[in-house]
């Protein structure tokens, strides 16, 4: 197997993203540059809300990323009981 050098994509522009059923904007989140993705509407069962990094030739390997977020305001509350 041939090892390819690691590539880094700087997301300082939205032009490298192929957006499907999402709106994207460049933001600062907790003091760091970030891309904010928000679903445009409820996708049908055949449509997925996703942003694809165009121009990559990724086939096999590892994608490292940091993902942050918070539950939606209408998300159900789940409580877990611990047995201490």
Image (tube, rainbow, N blue to C red):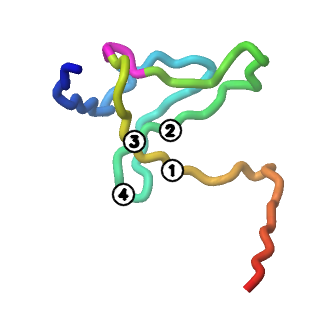
- Secondary element under disc 2, as helix, strand or loop, is strand
Instruction: Assess whether residue 55 is covered by the magenta stretch.
Output: yes
Real-space Cα distance between discs 4 and 3?
17 Å
Percent x, y for residue 49? 63, 24
Which residue was labeled with disc 4? 31
- Above or below — where is 58 with respect to 13? above
Q: Which mark is residue 36?
A: 2
Q: Residues within 10 Å of mark 4 (few under 14, many from 20)?
A: few
The picture quadrant where one finds residue 5 is top left
Q: Which mark is residue 68?
A: 1
Which residue was labeled with disc 3? 65
- Above or below — where is 80 with respect to 30? below
- Secondary element under disc 3, as helix, strand or loop, is loop
Q: Are marks 3 and 2 in contact (CB under 8 Å)?
A: no
Q: Residues within 10 Å of mark 2 (few under 14, many from 20)?
A: some
Q: Residues within 10 Å of mark 1 (few under 14, many from 20)?
A: few
Q: Are marks 2 and 4 in contact (CB under 8 Å)?
A: no
Q: Is residue 7 left or right of residue 22?
A: left
| Magenta extent | 53-57
Q: Earlier in the sequence, mark 3 or mark 2?
A: 2
């Amino acid at each position: 197997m041939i090892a390819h050098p690691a590539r880094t994509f700087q997301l300082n522009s939205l032009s490298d993203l192929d957006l499907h059923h999402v709106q994207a904007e460049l933001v600062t989140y907790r003091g760091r540059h970030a891309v904010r993705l928000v679903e445009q509407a409820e996708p049908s069962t055949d449509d997925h809300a996703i942003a694809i990094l165009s121009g990559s030739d990724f086939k096999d390997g590892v994608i490292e990323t940091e993902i942050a977020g918070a539950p939606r305001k209408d998300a159900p509350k789940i409580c877990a009981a611990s047995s201490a």
